[in-house]
Image (spheres, grey):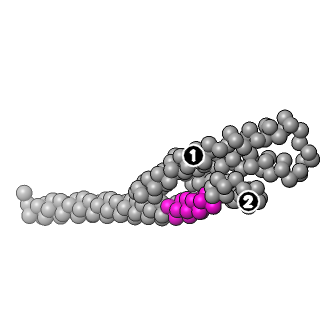
Amino acid sequence: MDQGIAALVAAGFGLAGTAVGGAAAVWGAKMGAERSAQAVKQQVQDQAAAEHAHWLRQQRSEAYEQFEDTYNEVARLVALGEEQDVSQAAELIRTLHRWQARIEILGPVAVAESADGVLSVLMMRLAALTALHRMNSGADGTPDEDYARTINDLVDDSQFLPDRWREYHLDFVAAAQAVMGSHQSAQ
């Protein structure tokens, strides 16, 4: 083989090697950029998830605390059964209902169901006390004997309710503690 042909063949192989090497470098750079972009995308998604979990935890904490504070006051008033406290208890029940609705939105279901149980039983007791107050104050006129007996029976039957709302309240506290103490509070 002549030296000129050998030089051309060597140059051809060199050129082919350069082209293959360049293509490999471009492909490697592209793959590196795609992996880097994917890592950045995953980091942004992870950060967004962490921020949402933190926000949800704060929202739940506030709702649970406000529900608890309002519960303590309304439970005290309706447990007493004093007629002068009926209007104050009714206002607190409305506030408790707003917090219960927020808990229902924020979840999780176990906490929302317990809060609903607390609210429902407290509302039953308040309804009995409100009916007694209206009857005793004459707000609806003079009641007949059957009506008075029905209202008094309703109030007597509601005497067991403090035990029920305390049970629901204990369930609420346990469920809220489980959520707030877990790392899965965003679920």
- Residue bearing mark 1: 163
Res 38 quadrant in image? bottom left
Q: Which residues are magenta?
A: 57-74
Is 38 displayed left or right of 126 in the figure? left
Residue depicted at 72% across the width and 43% down the height: 155
Q: Amino acid at mark 2?
A: Asp
SS for callout 1: helix
Camera-side residue of 153 and 88: 153
Viewer-proximal residue among 106 and 10: 106
The image shows residue 144 at horizontal and vertical percentages of: 89, 38
The image quadrant of residue 96 is bottom right
Task: Name the residue located 57 percent from the left edge and 46 percent from the top edge.
Answer: 163
Residue nearer the viewer, 108 or 134: 134
Q: On the rendered structure, is 70 left or right of 172?
A: right
- Residue 178 % position (x, y): 44, 53
Q: Which residue is mark 2?
A: 85
Q: Position of residue 15 (x, y in %)?
A: 22, 63
Q: Is residue 7 left or right of residue 52?
A: left
Q: Say which residue appears at 77% left-offset and 50% top-offset.
A: 130
Q: Is residue 40 at all visible to an observer of this figure?
A: yes
